[in-house]
Amino acid sequence: MKDHHLASLRIYNQQIHNPQFKTPEDVVKYMVAMQAQDYAGAKWAIGLRMKIANENFIEQAIGDGKILRTHLLRPTWHFVLPQDIRWILNLTAPRIKAANAGMYKKFGVDDAIFNKSNNTLAKALEGDKQLTRPELVDVLQKAGIATDELRFTMLLMQAELDQVICSGKRVGKQFTYALLDDRAPAYSPLKHEEALTKLAAGYFNSRGPATVHDFAAWSGLTVTDATTGLENIKAGLINEVIEGKTYWMPDHEDLIIPKNPKAHLLPMYDEFAIAYKHRDALVKPPYLEQARHVIFEQPIIVDDQVVGTWRRTLKKTTADITLNLFGKLNKTQTKAVETAITRYQKFLF
C-alpha cells in the first residue's frame, strides 16, 4: 500500500468521499469526536461529511444540544454527542488534568478553588440557564474567585472536565455555557476497558488505516491504553505492514476509489490531517515542505493529496475564495477545485 492509497482509504473511511450522512449528529456519532478549535471550520468539517449540508442546519443542531462542544481530548475543543461525552471524559479527563497541573500551580489554582468555582457555576446555571463568558466572569468575581490572566479559562476547562458544564446555544456570536446535567443526563458509566474498546472502535473504523501510535496521539491516551483498546477490536479489522508499521482499518468490500479527479476544501484542524501522528501520506510528495504546517492551514485536496491552501473573504451573499496552489493543476483538476468552491459557498449561503 503506497502513501497515496493510504490517503485514499482514509478520505473514504472519513466519509469525505461520497458522504452518506443526512444529519450533523450522524456525522459526529460516526466520527466519535471531531476537533472544534476553529468553530467555523469545524462546522464545515461536519458539512463535508454530509450528503447535503447547510451551516445554519449545523448551527441549529449545536444550539439544540444534539451536538456538544467541550474540551475532550489532549485537551482541545471537540464536538461530541450527549450520549458519548461522559464516558469519553471519564477516560480522558485524568490525563488532561495531569497535563494541566503545572499551569494550575503557576496561576495558583487548586482543588479548593476548583470546587468553589464548580459549585458557583452550577448554581448560576440552575434552571436550564445558559450564560455567556462575560456573564460567567461576573458570576465568579462576585463569588470572590479571581478570573484574571488565564485563570478564567482554566476554571471553565476544569468545570468541563469535571462534567459540570458544556456548551450552550450561541447568543449572536457569543458562546454560552450550560449545565451538562441539562444537556446530557447521567447514565451508568462504562468500565475503563469498555471505554477504551469503544473509543478504539470509533477511531479505527472512521479513520483507518492508522497505527496504534496514531490512535494514542489523537486521543491523548497512553500507548499502553491505546494498545488495549486496539487488541479488543482487532478481530473486526484488517491490517497491513508498511515500512515496519502496522496499519489497521475496516474491511470494506464496497470500497470504490473515484476514477475522476475529486477536490475538497478542508478546514483547519480537519480530522483528515489532525487524526494522525505522521501526515506525509496526505501531501503530494513535491509539496512536503510547503505543506509542513498542514494542520494549521486550510488545505486544498486534489486526488486525496494536499496541493495548496485556501482562505475565504465573507460578503453579504457569498464568499470569495482565494487559492494558494503549490503547483500547476490540469484542466480536469481545476474543474474539480471549482466544484469544491461552489459546494462550500452553497454551504454558507
Image (tube, rainbow, N blue to C red):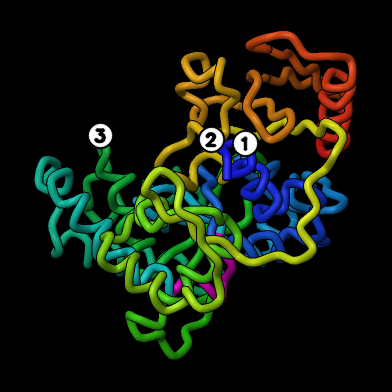
Q: Which residue is mark 3?
A: 149
Q: On the picture, is 60 further left or further right than 223?
A: right
Q: Tell me the tag on residue 281.
A: 2
Where, quadrant-wise, is the C terminus in this rendering? top right
Q: Are dots 3 and 1 in contact, CB under 8 Å? A: no
Q: Residue at x 82, y 50 (%)?
A: 18
Viewer-nearest residue: 208 or 50: 208
**253 falls in the magenta region:** no
Amino acid on which the number 1 mark rests in the picture: His
Q: Position of residue 140 (x, y in %)?
A: 31, 53
- Which callout, 3 or 2, points to the residue nearer the camera? 2
Viewer-nearest residue: 162 or 14: 14
Amino acid on which the number 3 mark rests in the picture: Glu
Amino acid on which the number 2 mark rests in the picture: Ala
Q: Regarding mark 3 in the picture, which secondary structure is present there?
A: loop
Q: On the picture, is 38 further left or further right than 232?
A: right
**83 falls in the magenta region:** yes
Q: Which residue is mark 1?
A: 4
Q: Residue furthest bottom?
A: 188
Q: Position of residue 33 (x, y in %)?
A: 53, 59
Q: Position of residue 124 (x, y in %)?
A: 42, 65
| Mark 3 or 2, nearer chain start | 3
Residues drawn in magenta:
80-86
- Which callout, 3 or 1, points to the residue nearer the camera? 1
Q: Residue furthest top?
A: 328
Question: Dot 3: within a 10 Å radius of its alpha carbon, few (fewer than 14), some, or many (20 or more) residues?
Answer: few
| Mark 3 or 1, nearer chain start | 1
Q: Position of residue 315 (x, y in %)?
A: 81, 20
